[in-house]
Image: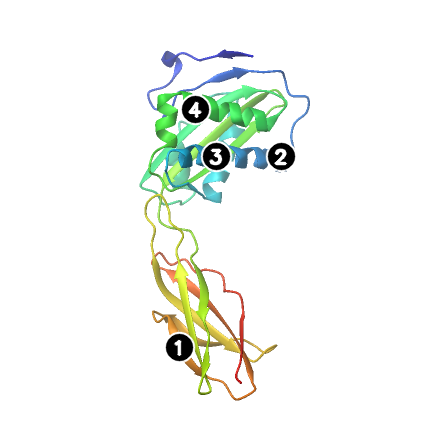
Amino acid sequence: MRRVHRPLAAVSVLVLSLTTLLTMPATAASPSTVELREAAAHVEALINARRERRDKRAFRLDTRVAALAQAKAQDMIDRDYFSHVDTKGRVARDHLRRADIRFTRVGEIIAWNRGGDLMAAAESAVGMWMASSVHKRQIMTNNNYFGAGVATDGSTIKWTVIFITGPDRTKPTARFTGSPVVDGKVRLAWTGSDPKLVVGTAGIKSFDLDGRVPGGAWTRIRTKTTARSLSRGVPTGATREFRVRARDKAGNIGAWSATLGVTAP
């Protein structure tokens, strides 16, 4: 296998990372949309694996950012260029703003290579980025969200990864921690967790609690409560079901917990 590296002089001063070329056998057929997304997801996983090896928290996938990375990779194929600046003079931050994606910092790395095995090509691209101090520094930065994209014309494969520091968009989770029934009352207790980001984790703000008779409609018991426990009357021999969900300080609302069934003795 022969690696050919583009010289630094060929890279624009606006480019955020070093461009690299890997020559491999030509692709036999164009991959499907699903295959392209799987290859992009492989790049994302490989990048996070490299971070974790260095005791750094993984980036969270932002599907909006991944869509922009995919569009950029496809545009480079369609318009036959290889640059952080597209043919309209726009860079990653311009596309983020046009997509109404909030951010305080942005980075982008790109690569191109050839080959019939997209997964192998993905591993080669990440390997080359990690071998470059400029690329590696970008991969190891303290952004919190990212997304990768890949496109091919059946021969050349072009890759884009966009990193951002943006507001917390990750949904929190909630679960019950106890439900003993004492003197005809169920003492519900719950907790929540807001998944940790590299930076900017919002933190839990409040909870919603619902209850119902089995098979009936859910009724709201508490909305946006900061409490983490509640006593609720349950008739002797009766069964009641409960569910809880969390809200974080950034306004994200998590999914409902597993339904908790309680029967009073």
Q: CA distance from mark 2 to mark 1?
A: 49 Å
Label located before the other in sequence (1 or 3): 3
Residue occupying image coordinates x 45% and y 32% = 161
Residue occupying image coordinates x 34% and y 56% = 203
Q: CA distance from mark 4 to mark 1?
A: 53 Å
- Looking at numbered disc 2 in the image, what kind of residue is underneath it? Glu
Label located before the other in sequence (4 or 1): 4
Label located before the other in sequence (3 or 2): 2
Q: Which residue is mark 1?
A: 230
Label located before the other in sequence (3 or 4): 3
Q: Secondary structure at mark 2?
A: helix
Q: Which residue is mark 4?
A: 129
Instruction: Give x and y (percent) for residue 121.
Output: 56, 24
Label located before the other in sequence (2 or 4): 2
Question: In the image, 164: left or right of 127?
Answer: left
Nearer the viewer's eye, disc 4 or disc 1? 1
Residue occupying image coordinates x 49% and y 20% = 81
Near mark 1 (Cα within 10 A), the count class, few <14, some 14-19 or many ≥20, is some
Q: Which residue is mark 2?
A: 35
Is 196 situated above or below 142? Answer: below
Is 191 situated above or below 149? Answer: below
Looking at the rendered image, the quarter that the N terminus falls into is top right
- Report the disc number at residue 69: 3
